[in-house]
Amino acid sequence: MEGLGARERAVFTFMVLTHEKLLKPYADYFRETLSPMQLNVLGLLGTYGTMTMTGLSEKLHTTRQQMTQIVTRLFELEFVERQPDEKDRRLIKIRMTEKAEALLHEGAFRFVQDILDRAEQLGDSEKLLEAMETVSRILPCLGEGPAG
């Protein structure tokens, strides 16, 4: 981290701690039911709605073949539905089922409540929520990858 300024260190530390303190424990909560990649697929579908296999592959930086295997497993678990596109039958649209929505809702509720309870013990739950709301508003505007 030598050579980085305070702002760059802050961003880097934020990314590392977000993974360590939020993303990994959240994935661990679902470990018995979903792999981290399956959870990522459901997270994208929950955020963006119906997506194509190509769209999912691009967002998760994986091949279409790998995405097909992941989506097939989610389909077998009844967590996604596959629908041919009405205009282009070659395109398959993937959407999350109510069963998956219920699983994610329950998991998110328990996980978020635990995070907020721990933040409350520190006396910072409102600050944490405000910061998360701010970051959630800004992140979609940043685009993909480094500006160049």
Image: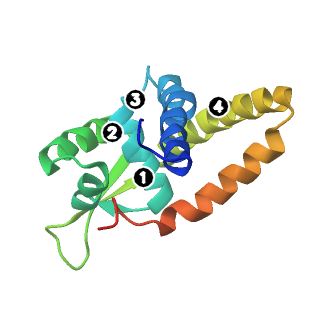
In-image side of 87 versus 131 (left or right): left
Q: Label 4 belongs to which residue?
A: 111
Q: Residue 41 in the image: state x and y as whole percent.
A: 37, 46
Taking the spot 71% from the left edge, 28% from the top edge, the residue there is 114
Mark 2 vs mark 1, foreground winner is 1
Q: Label 1 belongs to which residue?
A: 44
Q: Label 2 belongs to which residue?
A: 74
Looking at the image, residue 68 lies above or below residue 33: below
- Amino acid residing under circle 1: Leu
Q: Residue 2 in the image: state x and y as whole percent.
A: 41, 36
Tags 4 and 1 in contact by the CB under 8 Å rule? no
In-image side of 39 versus 94 (left or right): right
Farthest-out residue, front? 3
Q: Earlier in the sequence, mark 3 or mark 2?
A: 3
Q: Earlier in the sequence, mark 1 or mark 3?
A: 3
Residue 34 bears which disc, if any?
3
- Amino acid residing under circle 3: Leu
Q: CA distance from mark 1 to mark 3?
A: 14 Å
Q: Earlier in the sequence, mark 4 or mark 3?
A: 3
Q: CA distance from mark 3 to mark 2?
A: 9 Å
Mark 2 vs mark 4, foreground winner is 4
Q: CA distance from mark 4 to mark 1?
A: 18 Å
**Label 3: few (<14), some or many (≥20) within 10 Å?**
some
Tags 4 and 3 in contact by the CB under 8 Å rule? no
